[in-house]
Amino acid sequence: MSDKIFYPAAGAVALLLIVLSFVWPQGQGLRSPPPFGHTVELPDYYRMVKARDARRAKEAREKEDARVKAAAAASSVAAKLR
């Protein structure tokens, strides 16, 4: 085969493989990041853990607020009884 045909053809194949690597699915079922593929999303387990931690933090804040309000109400009742 002539070098004038082989090397340009090999270069074109190499270029096509590089372009294909940008849009081919990545490991663990994830797609390439934009602009070549879809946005990367965390697996469901990590989203669940993040949501659970946020919910627990919110519940702790609400519990602390309720405790502070109850203490304030108790002190105001004690002040009125004096």
Image: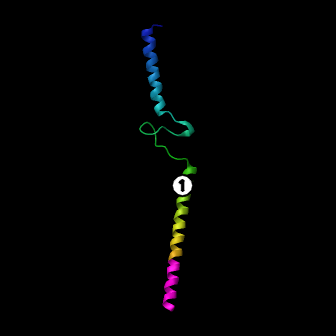
Name the residue beneath numbered marker 1: 50
- Give, as a three-letter code, the residue at label 1: Lys
- Disc 1 packing (10 Å; few <14; some 14–19; many ≥20): few
Which residue is at a point 46% across and 20% down the rendered structure image? Answer: 13
Secondary element under disc 1, as helix, strand or loop, is helix
Residue 65, percent from left and from top: 50, 72
Q: As displayed, is residue 20 above or below residue 1?
A: below
Q: As displayed, is residue 3 above or below residue 46?
A: above
Residue 9, percent from left and from top: 44, 16
Which residue is at a point 46% across and 12% down the rendered structure image? Answer: 6
Residue 43, percent from left and from top: 55, 47
Viewer-proximal residue among 11 and 62: 62
Dominant secondary structure, magenta: helix
Viewer-proximal residue among 57 and 39: 57
Viewer-proximal residue among 79 and 62: 79
Q: Residue furthest bottom?
A: 82
Q: Which residues are magenta?
A: 69-82
Which residue is at a point 49% across and 43% down the rendered structure image? Answer: 40
The answer to whether residue 70 is magenta is: yes
Residue 36, percent from left and from top: 43, 36
The answer to whether residue 78 is magenta is: yes
